[in-house]
Amino acid sequence: MGRLFIESLNGPKIFKCKCCKVDSASHDDIISKDFQGRYGRAYLFKNVVNISLGPNEDRHLMSGLHTVNDIYCSSCQQILGWRY
């Protein structure tokens, strides 16, 4: 296996993986806070870093059927959310 590349973000408010504390997104990249996730409140970001994507999957969300990918932390593989 190769060496893991981790990108660091600058700014006063940075979202981090809750398990390994690797940077994930900047507060400035929030598009919307009006989403509901599996486990509560969710945000929509225009840019995220240090993630890997799972396979395409069709899911019934509150707004209908969507094709999504789960998003995982690239460092510890903790699930962070999903991508439309």
Image: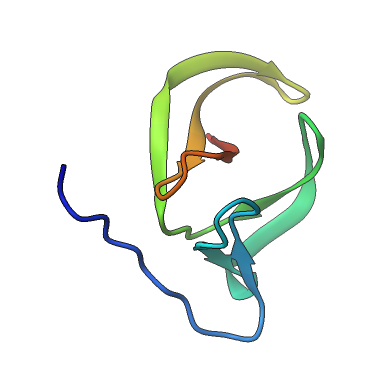
Q: Is residue 70 left or right of residue 15?
A: left
Q: Is residue 5 left or right of residue 1?
A: right
Vertical order, 78 against 59 (above or below): below
Say how the picture is coloured: rainbow
Residue under the point 64% across and 51% down: 44
Vertical order, 3 against 58 (above or below): below
Q: Residue furthest right?
A: 40
Report which quarter residue 1 is drawn in: top left
Query: At which x and y percent is residue 58?
Result: 53, 13
Query: At which x and y percent is residue 84?
Result: 53, 34
Residue under the point 59% across and 55% down: 17
Q: Nearer the viewer, residue 75 or 62?
A: 75
Q: Nearer the viewer, residue 54 or 2?
A: 2
Q: Is residue 56 left or right of residue 12?
A: left
Residue under the point 48% across and 60% down: 47
Report which quarter residue 28 is drawn in: bottom right
Q: Nearer the viewer, residue 51 or 77?
A: 77
Residue under the point 41% across and 56% down: 50
Q: How many marks on residues? A: 0
Q: Residue furthest left?
A: 2
Query: At which x and y percent is residue 27?
Result: 65, 71
